[in-house]
Image (cartoon, rainbow, N blue to C red):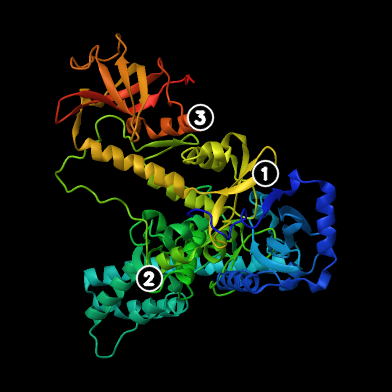
């Protein structure tokens, strides 16, 4: 987001305030004013378009949306005021959180009685409890349960008989081929005819392979039949179109419970598939285990299959192929299958267990926001072109990969997490933007990461970052369809803030260091040394540097050329993390960033041109002297 122009809040004399920080009487008066519109509340053109887009995505994915009337008919029991945008003389617009039949939606109402924007929001009260709120009816008692148990018992016997018959038939065919005894032909033929009857429903391909053709000799037929039975009695590894595999469950929870993804929402896998971070044909975790039941492959990994089918629905222009491990029928496989087989149809669909029957889970709400509401034209275009997050190129075989000497100057510690560079941090913040919406404060973990990033803003004092108590996600003041972070202070004031300016600053620091590193060599294998600032100078033409003397006693051997010398330290060679800390705590921009006596930890270098020694990657050691 660039500089704010004529269309932003400030130029229009608007200011946003959370309802918790407003006069309760004023908030009640605004609510009553909106309530007075009743059925005359109009849905604006932009709001209508967004509602239709979200509803279409929900419908495509097998979920239901709310009705338009729920977003235009004010009901005090389900409408809650969240924030108010104030003009110079009166309120300009008000934001409400509305509890609809499919979860909460955000509704923005103007003073003129028009709904200017609507979008679904993530409900913080949903989540783990939502899974247990859904109940299937197949566990009920009475005649229905008795019939279901009887049917399951009969199916267990049928599949167990099929398993034993296949193994017995294979053994008989192998014995016949080994002996070549002609007297066994009639017995083998009868066995295979019986197997044909058993297999025609579940294994139609095997049933066909067991059929003897009049033009075929006994041995070729027996060999072909034996190979077919041997194949279905063992594990088969296939690559199939995702449409060829069905579900065994009638409903699934919204999170994985086992494996490396335990605890993660299934929608995370849909997003990973979307951006190419995982490959169904390469990643072992995406292998589908299945059985062939009544002529169709049915998955025993229903959540995994749901994510793959959702990926096909949403993003894949071509066929999505998956690796399938088909298990042979055995007592253990039959037990596992019958425990999983709750589907009432043909296995074509499965429901997600949510608190509101048929409503989308909260993770689907979050990603739908990213696609339908918070996505910018540029991001949509990038996705259409197939933009993907790719791994960095690997070094050729035989070439040793070494870490840069000394600590990587690009590493960032944000909110207690370490990121390899600002680019990975930027990607993480984009995920936070997509996953949060509607004025809900960021979770503590995300809040700390974002707040640390904002310390790199070029003017943290003007933004009063020290007073920030919460951060939310909303639309940019200047660009209505651009998601951005909003900071909220102790006094209730709030404004949007440009994270792009933070990335620009980090990019500038990185490029400056990289340019100078081409002209200098790191000393002492990149070890860090402690030292004290002798003096700092701010001069003309942007000069900003100081002189450091290393401590006389060090844990490591100090290079002779640096021992006892004044070492040059330029502002751009101060670590990015320390620069941000100084900018956030500096009382006056005009004063030097450091005072004499300030302690640092730094890496030493030598210039190619003149052999002089200096400091780089200098980290501020607390306390910070002001």
Residue 236, image x, y percentages? 35, 65
Residue 77, image x, y percentages? 83, 59
Q: What residue is shown with label 2?
A: 240
Question: Between tags 1 and 2, which lies in front?
Answer: 1
Farthest front residue?
540
Q: What residue is shown with label 3?
A: 588
Is label 3 in a helix, a strand or a loop?
loop
Is residue 298 visible in the rendered structure shown here? no
Q: What residue is shown with label 1?
A: 493
Tell whether 607 sits left or right of 130. Answer: left
State the CA–CA distance, disc 1 to disc 2: 56 Å
State the CA–CA distance, disc 3 to disc 2: 66 Å
Quadrant of the rendered image containing residue 57: bottom right
Question: Between tags 1 and 3, which lies in front?
Answer: 3
Q: Which mark is residue 92?
A: none
Q: Residues within 10 Å of mark 3 (few under 14, many from 20)?
A: few
Q: Earlier in the sequence, mark 1 or mark 3?
A: 1
State the CA–CA distance, disc 1 to disc 3: 23 Å
Q: Earlier in the sequence, mark 3 or mark 2?
A: 2
Question: Between tags 3 and 2, which lies in front?
Answer: 3
């Amino acid at each position: 987001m660039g500089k704010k122009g004529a269309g932003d809040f400030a130029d229009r004399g608007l200011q946003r305030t959370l309802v918790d920080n407003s006069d309760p009487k004023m908030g009640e008066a605004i609510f009553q004013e909106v309530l007075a519109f009743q059925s005359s509340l109009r849905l604006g053109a932009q709001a209508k378009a967004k509602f239709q887009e979200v509803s279409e995505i929900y419908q495509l994915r097998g979920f239901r949306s709310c009705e338009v009337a729920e977003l235009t008919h004010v009901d005090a029991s389900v409408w809650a005021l969240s924030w108010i945008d104030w003009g110079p003389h009166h309120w300009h617009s008000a934001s409400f959180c509305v509890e609809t039949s499919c979860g909460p939606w955000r509704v923005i109402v103007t003073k003129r009685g028009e709904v200017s924007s609507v979008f679904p929001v993530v409900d913080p009260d949903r989540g783990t409890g939502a899974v247990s709120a859904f109940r299937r009816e197949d566990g009920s008692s009475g005649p229905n349960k008795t019939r279901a148990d009887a049917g399951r018992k009969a199916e267990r016997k049928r599949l167990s008989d099929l398993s034993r018959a296949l193994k017995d038939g294979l053994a008989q065919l192998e014995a016949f081929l080994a002996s070549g005894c002609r007297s066994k032909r009639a017995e083998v033929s009868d066995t295979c005819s019986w197997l044909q009857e058993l297999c025609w429903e579940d294994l139609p391909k095997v049933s066909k392979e067991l059929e003897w053709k009049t033009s075929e000799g006994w041995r070729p037929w027996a060999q072909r039949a034996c190979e077919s039975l041997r194949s279905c009695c063992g594990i088969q590894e296939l690559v199939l179109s995702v449409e060829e595999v069905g579900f065994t469950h009638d409903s699934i929870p919204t999170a994985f419970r086992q494996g490396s993804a335990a605890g993660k929402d299934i929608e995370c896998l849909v997003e990973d598939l979307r951006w190419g971070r995982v490959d169904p044909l390469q990643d072992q975790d995406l292998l589908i285990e299945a059985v062939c039941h009544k002529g169709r492959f049915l998955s025993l990994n229903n959540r995994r299959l749901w994510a793959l089918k959702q990926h096909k629905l949403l993003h894949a222009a071509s066929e999505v192929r998956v690796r399938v491990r088909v298990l042979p029928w055995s007592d253990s496989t039959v037990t596992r299958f019958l425990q999983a087989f709750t589907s009432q149809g043909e296995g074509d669909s499965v429901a997600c267990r949510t608190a509101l029957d048929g409503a989308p889970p909260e993770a689907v709400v979050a990603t739908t926001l990213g696609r339908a509401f918070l996505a910018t034209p540029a991001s949509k275009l990038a996705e259409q072109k197939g933009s993907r997050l790719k791994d960095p190129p690997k070094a050729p075989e035989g070439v040793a990969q070494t870490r840069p000497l000394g600590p990587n100057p690009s590493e960032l510690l944000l909110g207690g997490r370490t990121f390899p560079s600002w680019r990975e941090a930027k990607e993480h913040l984009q995920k936070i933007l997509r996953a949060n919406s509607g004025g809900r404060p960021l979770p503590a973990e995300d809040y700390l990461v974002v707040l640390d990033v904002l310390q790199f803003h070029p003017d943290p004092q003007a933004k009063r970052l020290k007073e920030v108590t919460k951060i939310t996600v909303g639309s940019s003041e200047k660009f209505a369809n651009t998601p951005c972070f909003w900071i909220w202070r102790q006094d209730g004031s709030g404004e949007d803030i440009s994270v792009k300016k933070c990335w620009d600053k980090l990019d500038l620091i990185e490029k400056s260091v990289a340019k100078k590193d081409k002209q200098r060599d790191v000393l002492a294998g990149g070890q860090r040394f402690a030292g004290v600032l002798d003096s700092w100078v701010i001069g003309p033409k942007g000069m900003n540097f100081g002189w450091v003397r290393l401590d006389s006693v060090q844990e490591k051997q100090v290079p002779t050329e640096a021992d006892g010398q004044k070492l040059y330290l330029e502002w751009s060679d101060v670590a990015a993390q320390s620069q941000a800390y100084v900018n956030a705590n500096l009382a006056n921009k005009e004063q030097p960033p450091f005072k004499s006596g300030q302690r640092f930890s730094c890496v030493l270098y030598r210039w190619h041109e003149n052999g002089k020694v200096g400091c780089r990657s200098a980290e501020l050691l607390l306390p910070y002297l002001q």
